[in-house]
Amino acid sequence: MTTRRTQAERSALSESRMLRAAIRLIAKQGYSKTTLAQIGEASGYSRGLASHRFGSKEGLLQVLVEGSAGRFLEEQVLPAIEGRSGLEALSVLVDTYLNELVVREERLRAIYVLMGEALGPVPEIREVFVKLNGAFRDSARGSIEAGIKDGEIRSDLDPVVESALFVGTLRGVAMQWVLEPDCFDLVAVRASVKESLARHLSADAPAKLAAARTRA
């Protein structure tokens, strides 16, 4: 006998389907051209259900971005770096973030489409990404600060500046790969990013650089 879903289960299912439909549409045609009616129809429901459920496109976007980012942070990033700090934690963050490109390319494509539109035609969604980027930088900064405290990372560095560079590097690599997946070997770039981080952040990096300049 088939068990009937509860109202809560049906609501959760319809929301999940509409969010997946929103991701597909935004990745394909952008946020500005995507309507709540299209999302409702593309998910197999009525034109008005998405509007009823989320209230507005901005409301749907907040659920989409914060839900995706929150799950990624709680289910993948935090468990991956638990018990780790400094360079090891940063290396794991690089792997976790760039591996996600391959696993969830369409979702990330939609996120980057939205991020671009937040800078221009849709400024009302900017705050969502301000919070998202802030949380990402905070995670990196915490690892850098712990590495400085342990003596593994250079004490002359500013964790706020370095966390911004860290996030910027990963965002830049991801943006290029999403636009053109065949433009470079993602595995090789990922390894190079980690190597560059170690060279730049390591506590003995200044001594190695001075020795290299002496030899030159």
Image (spheres, rainbow, N blue to C red):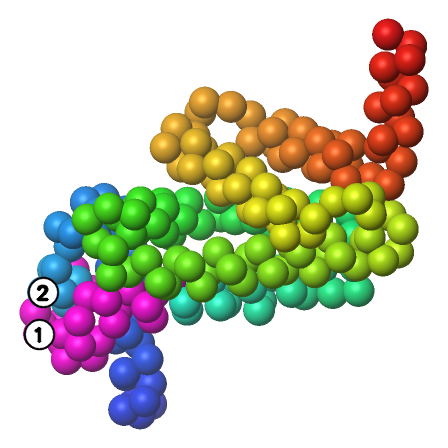
Provide residue 214's location: percent of width, then percent of height. Answer: 91, 13
Q: Horizontally, is 6 left or right of 40 in the view? A: right
Q: Secondary structure at mark 1?
A: loop
The front one of 189 and 203 is 203
Per the picture, the main secondary structure of the magenta-coloured stretch is: helix
Residue 191 shows up from this direction: no
**Rendering quarter of residue 211:** top right
Residue 42 belongs to the span the image colors magenta: yes
Seen at 84% across and 23% down, the residue is 209
Residue 56 shows up from this direction: yes
Q: Which mark is residue 24?
A: none
Q: Which tag, 2 or 1, sits closer to the chain's start? A: 2
| Dot 1 crowding, Cα within 10 Å, few <14, some 14–19, many 20+ | some
**How many numbered dots are placed on residues in this image?**
2
Residue 153 belongs to the span the image colors magenta: no
* Amino acid type assigned to the residue bearing label 2 in the image: Ala
**Rendering quarter of residue 4:** bottom left
| Dot 2 crowding, Cα within 10 Å, few <14, some 14–19, many 20+ | some
Q: Horizontally, is 187 left or right of 201 in the view? A: left
Q: Secondary structure at mark 2?
A: helix
Stretch of the chain drawn in magenta: 41-65
Q: CA distance from mark 2 to mark 1?
A: 6 Å
Provide residue 204's location: percent of width, then percent of height. Answer: 89, 36
Name, please, the residue furthest toward the top.
216
Q: Which mark is residue 37?
A: 2
Please say if the residues under marks 2 and 1 sit with CB atoms less than 8 Å apart.
Answer: yes
Q: Which residue is mark 1?
A: 48
Seen at 87% across and 48% down, the residue is 152
Q: Horizontally, is 207 left or right of 161 in the view? A: right
**Rendering quarter of residue 61:** bottom left
The front one of 91 and 42 is 91
